Amino acid sequence: MNSLEFDNVTFSYAGAKEPALKDINLKIPKGQSVLIAGPNAAGKTTLCRCMNGLVPHFFIGDLNGKVTINGINSKQSGIGQLSQVAGLVFDDPTSQLVCSTVKDEAAFGAENLGVSREEIDRRVTDALEAVRLIGYETRIPQTLSGGEQQAIAIASIMVMDPEIFVLDEPTSNLDPIGSMQVLSIISDLARKQEKTLIVVSHSIEHFVDLADRIIVMNEGRVVLDDAPKEVLQKTEQLLDMGLSPPEVTTLFSRLRAEGVSLGGGKIPIRLEEAYGALKNVSARKAPEPKSSAAEKRGDVVIEVKGVEFRYPSSDVLALNGINIEIRKNEFVAIIGQNGSGKSTLVKHFNGLLRPSGGTVSVYGLGTAKTPVWELSKRVGYVFQNPDLQLFNTTVRNEIDFSLKAIGMPLEKRGDVVESVSKRLNIQQYLDTSPGTLDKGGRQRVAIAAILAMNPDIFVIDEPTTGQDPAHSRQVMNIARELHSEGKTIVFITHNMEIVAEYAPRGIIMFHGRVLYDGPVRQLFQQTEVLKESFLEAPQMVRLAHMLRNQGFPSTLLTVEEMGEFIKQNVG
Amino acid sequence: MGLRIEVIPGESFLHKLDARPKFLLFLLITVIVIYFTDPIYVGAIMLAVLLLTRACNISIRKTGVIVKASSPLLIMYGLINVVLGPANTLAAKTPSNILFYLMPVMNWFPVTPQGIVQSVAICIRYAIVVYLLQPVVDIVLALVKWKFPSSLALGTSIGFNFVPVFMNTAASIMDAQACRGWKGLKSGNLADRVRALPVLLVPLFLHGIESAQKIAVAIEAKGFGYNLAKRTYSREIRLRTIDYVTLAVECIIFVVSTILYYTGYGTYMFTYSLLSGLRL
């Protein structure tokens, strides 16, 4: 029997003009593991909501066609009944946990279904063991790390014992450690092949090994549906949709398009396959690629000297003896796990936090005594979530707000608003409400509001977390453009491919200390440091390392560099 | 980061109590601080609360962070009460009570010693309630295990679980707005401050709605509301001797306080007469 069947399913949310799903036909057999990929607004989440009756019973609208979940027609059943068959895990760890202890949280779903106390106890123990949270029973879910919270969310579904697990972007809001933790739980689930597993994710590289099948959605339709090997052969189509196929796949696809043949057959989709295809070639000797960071030495714009910081409610130092200098027109990535001190550090750059010990100065101005609004003329801080900032009725007022706040005279403000909005391509929305724009549009408005103040330094906090690859790149490309105009950029990210692609200099934070500060090219050579801080180099860097004996420089960073090198020096 | 409200685990007798006497203790303290408007009475209650905190081996300095954080509000509240509190209004009717006027030329806003005394009591009361918000996270969850209707109990539980999340969001919004040159709620005159409120409240409100919907979806997806009559509870609850003793003590305190309240004790007049006695 199929676990899930979609027959000609079209669904429009109540009040929406366009259907979110169009003519979906799918059959997913029991025990299959499926990866669903697609850009924002492709309909992935709506598809998940159909799989346990949230659509059409909670999210009402116009559902045409038939969704069959384990033999039950979703229209003719309630969510309560369907929740016994299909369990959902969502992307935001905090807003799906409602109980006061881990054990209560794990038991919650089964209690709702009326499972006996003894049986719940047994299942909770099994589930907590499966997600490696034994010993956490009395902890408070809201105080745990994102990875642990996501593990509880999965455990609470296990306790309900459904046939189908639906995980909607389970790792997109997590740091690298959390992602690894959740990924290994999902791998265990997939390996057993007892349950049907549906995972929505942008991180194709990480799920390629455990998926039997990849479904790619775009604009409400299924556009590709096949085994991973087959789907990933259409690399260009995936890239055009703004998706991120594994780097090795992109590399081989590009080389093939340019007529560089590295053996026939299918394009590799895994690192090992790529190594297999290249291990018998030998490269001509070539100079090591140079880092562009080293030669530029501008004036110091931010100086952090012996900084310590402790949050009022905490015993541990969030920052412990930090010494760094940021020079004019640098492009710096700050990486590290959540809680390592990254945000705490950058919040010192514009006075949001004041050091408990040591000094921070911006353009020679001590941040301890200068108000944030004064520093914000020099240091622009772009927050991860634009929705925490937008409150005006029009985009124009939103941008104007910052200018008014820093005391710019009225006659100047109109011109600035016009030019900034043109620059970020939102001039057509100036008189509409920011709330009506999509996430990418709102992010641009938030950036425009900062850009309007014309700061010299931009701090960008996690532009990649919880975003689809196209959005992350959109923000990073704006940063790159500003950098080319002489601005200084400091950004925080968990995405190592973005670090390799954009930043010449990287800083690794770990437990409140700087573990590494130097060129990104050398950063990814520090195998021990990376291991210690649970970070993983991008696939290209790992491939270059594996190919060292074939004469490849181990400091190659990106698909472009590797492609160039192969074209010049191989064959 | 920043401000956190959470249960601090421990092994004290208070920690080990059943959730029900704990919950009643919270209710009791809340009720009796509302009964009394005298600084000495509420001061004694504050002392008792702090002693209980110590007995649980919990640092007063750390748990007091929340009171410290809300101190600007506390001071404002106190000042308003000095002028507009019922004791002041009543006492100001007798001109000899008036110490001075806040706006001397117009003779507006008279200030009386009675007003000041009551305001001090009200401030302490406020501080106690704010302080108590912390253990309440644990205490109110007693309802879940009690025979409360599960939807009500769950609602309360979610509410309290999300207080820290919500406060962190508020802190992030204030940070994010400060980065746009916003000078915060603490600068300018009263009108400026009122005008500054939407900057914080609009995003907070929208974020609240969004979270509420996510939570609703999450609990719905876990079958909440499916056949409530047959819902099971994984926790067993049983009262032990210590719980019964605590319940009895709580009842006694409640009865005594109620009698004091209805016989007119514990109003600001107590401290006021002591003070006037000293002056004489």
Image (cartoon, rainbow, N blue to C red):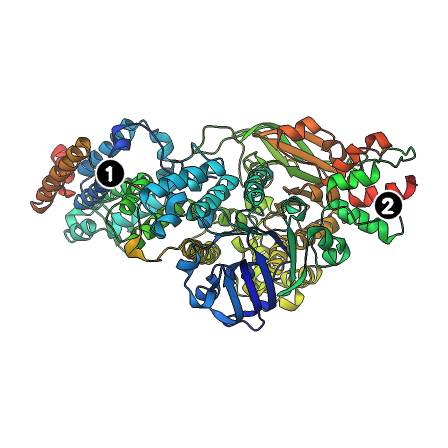
> What is the number of the mark on residue A248?
none
What residue sits right under mark 2 in the picture?
A263
Left or right, A395 with reference to A499: left
Left or right, A188 with reference to B245: right
Task: Give above or below for A113 relative to A328.
Answer: below
Please name the amino acid that badge 1 sits on. Answer: Lys
Residue with the most extreme left position: B263
**Which type of secondary structure does the marked residue at label 1 adopt?**
helix
Task: Give above or below for A328 relative to A71.
Answer: above
Query: In the rendered structure, the residue with mark 1 lies on which chain?
Result: B
Residue A476 position, x and y percent, is 69, 49
Have a look at marks 2 and 1 and say if they share a chain.
no
In-front residue for pair A354/B219: B219
* Viewport quadrant of the C terminus of chain A: top right
> What is the number of the mark on residue B22?
1
In-front residue for pair A183/A100: A183
Residue A229 position, x and y percent, is 72, 50
CA distance separating discs 2 and 1: 72 Å
Left or right, A413 with reference to B278: right
- From the viewer's perspective, is the residue at label 2 or at label 1 nearer? 2
Left or right, A324 with reference to A87: right
